[in-house]
Image (tube, helix red, strand yellow):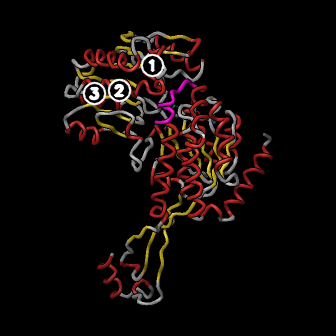
Amino acid sequence: MPDTDLQTRLSKMRSYFSSGAARSPEWRRAQLSALAGMGQRYEAEIFEALRQDFGKPAFEAFATETSFVTHGAKHALKHLRRWMRPRRVAADLANLPARARVVPEPLGLALIIAPWNYPYQLALAPLVGALAAGNCAVIKPSELAPATSALLARIVPECLDANAVQVIEGAVDTSKALLEEPFDHIFFTGSTKVGSAVMQAAGKHLTPVTLELGGKSPVILRKSADLDVAARRIAWGKCLNAGQTCIAPDYILAEQGVAEPFIQAFESQLRRFYGTDPQQSPDYPRIINTHHFDRLVRLLQDGNIRVGGLHDRDNRYIAPTVIYQPALDTALMRDEIFGPILPVFEVEDLDTAIAFINARPKPLALYLFSTDSADEKKLVAETSSGSLVVNDVLMQTTPPDLPFGGVGASGMGAYHGRASFDTFSHLKPVLRKYNRGEPPLRYAPYTAGKFRWLRRFL
Ligand code: NAD
C-alpha cells in the first residue's frame, strides 16, 4: 500500500478517536464483548489456521490462544467500571483544602505489532487493554503465520468497530512504514533485536512503547526439588508449541547430582506425553518454517545429545532434545533457543547458578524448582527477571491480574488484566482546589513568622 493510502487510513482512525466515540463505557463494553465472542464464533477457522501455520493441536490452540483472549476480554468487562474510576490520592497539607485524584484517559491511536508464535493471542491480548482503555488500534500480525494473519484481517472487521480497529497485514516493510507514522502508543511483541529498532523509530515521534521481548529464560533445579514434578512441568513447557514460546524454559542449571536423574525423568515424561516417536503424535507441533528449522538443526551440532536429536526437514519436525553441558560460546548458549532443545548444566550450588544468571542479560522469566522457601527469598533478593516462578513454568501468564512483561533486554512495560488497561491509558493527575479556607502562608511578603510556620509544615 502506498504511504498516502496508509496515511489516509490512519488519519480517519485518528478523527474517529477525536470524535470521542471510543471513550464511552458502552462502546468499550460492546467491543470487549465482541472480542470475547470472536474466539467462539470463529473457533473452527482459527484452529484450522493455526494448524496450517504450524500444526498447532486444537487443544493448545484453545488453551493458549482463543480462550486466553476470551478470558482476558471477559475479565476486562467484569472490572472495567472499577478500572475506569478516578483513583483518589490524599492531598498534602500545603494544598488543603483540595481534592487530588488520578483520572485514566485513553491515549489515542495505538499500534500493536505481533509475532508469529502465538499469532492469535499476541495480536489480540494487547487489544483487550487498548479497547478497555478507550483507544483505537492498528494491528500488524506476523507474516510468518500467514493463515492466522489472513484470518484476523477478515474476522476482526466483521466483529469489531472497523472505524476503530484495523488489521494491516504485511512483512517487515509494512511494519517499517507503520513505524514512520505517529501513534500514541506502540505495543511491540517480538525479538530483542527488532524491539530495539522499534524503539528507535518510536523516538522520532516521542511515542511511548511497550516492548515484550525475548531472551533466555533459565531454570534452577535444586536438590530439594520434586524431580518428577519438575521433569513433567519442564517437559510440558519446553514442548508446548514445540518450544516456540517466549518464556519457554531455555536451559537448566541443575545442582550437583541432580542433572542425571532429571534427564531420565524428563525422557520418561516425554514418552508419557508423546509415546516413543513424538513425530507420530498429533499433539506435538512443528517448527514454523524452514528458516527456523535449519537454525535449530544447526544448534543440535553444538553439544552432546542425551535425548532426542532426530529431525525431518520435510515436515519441519524436531524431536524434543536434551543436550548435556554444551560449550558456553556456542549459538545454543548465546541466543534464545526458541525450539524444543534443552541444554542441561550441572552447577555447584545456588550461588553459582545465581552468578551464572546475573552475568547475562536479564531474563524474561526465571524458574526455580525447590521446596526450600529460603531459595525463593534469595532469588527474589539477588536476581532480576521479568517474572519469577517457583515450581512451575509458563503459568505466570494465567492469573488475570498478574502483570506480564520483561525487564532490561527482555522488555519494558507490562500487560494482562489491569496492567493492560493502565498501559493503554494516561493516568492523568487532577488537582481540584477550592477558593476559600487558604492560609496566606505561601505569598510574599515572606515574614519571619511565615518562615517559622513553613519550617514546621515542610
Ligand atoms: P520478530 O521481532 O522477528 O518479529 C515481530 C514482528 O515485528 C513481526 O510482525 C514482524 O513483521 C515485525 N518486524 C520484523 N522485523 C522488523 C523490523 N526490522 N522493523 C519493524 N518490524 C519488524 O519476532 P518473531 O520472530 O515474530 O517472534 C519471536 C520473538 O518474539 C522471540 O524472540 C520471542 O521470545 C519473542 N516473543 C516475546 C513475547 C513476550 O511476550 N515477551 C511473546 C512472544 C514472542
Q: What residue is shown with label 2?
A: 234
Q: Secondary structure at mark 2?
A: helix
Cβ atoms under marks 2 and 1 closer than 8 Å:
no
Q: Is-magenta flag for residue 158?
A: no
Q: Position of residue 3 (x, y in %)?
A: 78, 43
For the question of whether residue 266 can be seen, the reply is yes
Give the distance between the C-alpha atoms of the residues marked 1 and 3, in whole angstroms: 26 Å
Callout 2, which amino acid?
Ile
Residue 275, relative to residue 440: is it above or below? above
Q: Position of residue 104 (x, y in %)?
A: 51, 63
In primary-sequence order, the first of circles 1 and 3 is: 3
Residue 39, relative to residue 431: is it above or below? above
Q: Secondary structure at mark 3?
A: helix
Q: Nearer the viewer, mark 2 or mark 1?
A: 2
Residue 365 found in image quarter: top left
Residue 229 numbered tag:
3
Q: What residue is shown with label 1?
A: 332
The residue lying at 66 percent from left, 42 percent from top is 155
Q: Quadrant of ligand 1?
A: top right
| Residue situated in front as seen by the camera: 196 or 376 | 376
- The magenta-colored residue range is 54-63
